[in-house]
Image (tube, grey):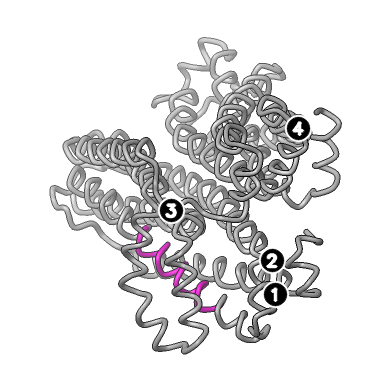
Amino acid sequence: MVSIALGQLRRRPAAFVGLAVALLLAIAAVTLFGSLIAAQAAAPAAARKAVAGPGVMVIAGAFGEIAVLVSFFVVVNALGFALRQQHRELALLRTIAATPRQARRLVRGQVLATTLLVAVPAWALGAVSARWFLAALQRRGMAAPGVRVPGSPVPILVAVAAALVVGLVASAVAARRISRIAPAAALTASSTEQGRTGVLRLLAGAGALVGGGLLLRLAATRSAEDLDKAAQAALLGSLVLLVAAALLGPLITRVLVAVLGAPIRVLVPGAGWLADANMRGYARRLSSAVVPVALLVGLSGTMSIMTITAGHAARASAGSVTSATDVWLRQAELGLLICFATVSTLNTLVAVTAERRREFALLRLVGATRGLLMRMLGAEAVLTAALGVLLGAAVAGAASAAFSRAVTGSAVPSVPVGACGWIVAGAVALTVPGILVTGLRAIAGPATELAGGGRD
C-alpha cells in the first residue's frame, strides 16, 4: 500500500497540490507561534519583565489561536477534495479485492507522505516568520530586545505532530464511507451524490450554530476594557458559525438557490437553466464551493469591521481602548487569515470544477457546445460568488455587531465601505476566473475519451 500511495502522488500531483500547500501553511503557522512562545519561555527573567504589557507569549497565543484553527480548517477541506478526486480509483481498488482496511491504509500513507514532504520548507517558513514577527514586536516596544527565537526543534515537531493528527483523523472520516460499503456500490457512489444530509451532520451543524451564537453572546457582554477578549470571542464565534455553515451547507444552498436561481434562468436563457439545474441537483458540491468563499468574506469582513469600530470607539472616548500596535496586530492577523482563506478558495474551486470532466463530456455528447458549457459555468460562477458573499456577510455582520455592542454599547458597528468593497471584489475575482479557467481546461479534449474516464 505504501508503493501505491507514493505512486498516486507521482501520477496525480495536481490532486495533492492544494493539500500540500494547506499543510505547509498550517505547519508554518504552528511553528511560527510555537517559536514565539518558546522565545518568551527561554528568555531571562529580566528580559521578560523589561517591557510592560502582555508579553510575547500572550500575544502569540491570542494571535495564533484563530490563525491555527483556520489553517487546520483549510487542511481538512483540502484533504477532503484530494480524496474526492481519487474516489473512482479507491472504488476500483475495492472491486479488485482491496479490503476496507487497505483502502484506509492507502489514504493514511498519502497523508503521511504529503506531510513529511512539506515539513522542511514549512519549518523554514515558520522559523523565518517567527524572527520577523518578533523583530516587529520589538520595534513597537512590545517585546524586549533581549528576547531571541531559540533553535529548539520542539516547535516544528509539535507542528508536524499536530498536522499529522488532524490529517489522519480527517482522512479516517473521509475514507470511512467508501471503505465501508460494498465494492460495486462504492464504484457507483463515485459518480453520484447522496440525496440526503446525514442526521449526525445535521446535529453537528446545529450544535456548531448554537456554539457560535453563545460565543457571540459572550463577546457582546464583555466590557470596553476587555476589548481583546471581546475581539477573540467574536472572531472565534464567526469561525464556529462558518463551520456550522459548512455542515449545514447543502440545506442552506438549496434555499438560497431556490431564491436566486430564477433570475439566472431569465438572464441567461439555456445556460442559466442548466446552471440552475446543476446547482439544485448537486447541493453538496455547490456547498463545497460556497463555504471557502464565505470563509474568505466572513473572516476578512469581521476583522476589518472590528478594527475600524475599535478605532472609532478610541477616538470617541477619553480613555484609549485601542492603539497603533493593536491595529497593526489585527492587520497582521487579517493578512494571515486572508492567505489561508485564499488557498482554501482556490483549491476548492479548482477541484470542484476539474472533477466534472466526465459530466461536461456527456453534455457535449448529447449536443451541448463548448460555448454553452462556458456560459453555464459563468452563470454558476456568478451564483457561487453571490452565495459565498451573502453567507460570509451574514457571519461578519453578526460577529461585528456583537463586538460593537461590547465596545460602543451599540449593535451597529462602523463599516469600512471601501475595505469591504475590496473584500467582495477579491472574492469575486478569485471565484469567477478560477471556475472559468479550470472549466475551459476541463472541457478540452475528445468528449468520447473523457466520458469513458480515459483521462484525468
Distance of mark 1 from mark 2, alpha carbons?
A: 10 Å
The residue beneath circle 1 is 440
The residue beneath circle 3 is 195
Residue ID at (28%, 56%) = 397
Could you tell me what secondary structure mostly forms the magenta stretch?
Answer: helix
In the rendering, at what x and y percent does residue 360 appear? 65, 72
The residue beneath circle 2 is 357
> On residue 47, which mark appears?
none
Residue ID at (41%, 47%) = 327
**Image marks 1 and 2: residues in contact by CB distance under 8 Å:** no
Q: Residues within 10 Å of mark 1 (few under 14, many from 20)?
A: some
Amino acid type shown at disc 1: Leu
Amino acid type shown at disc 3: Gly
Answer whether residue 350 is magenta in the image.
no
State which region is magenta: 378-391
Q: Nearer the viewer, mark 3 or mark 2?
A: 3
Q: Is residue 354 visible?
A: yes
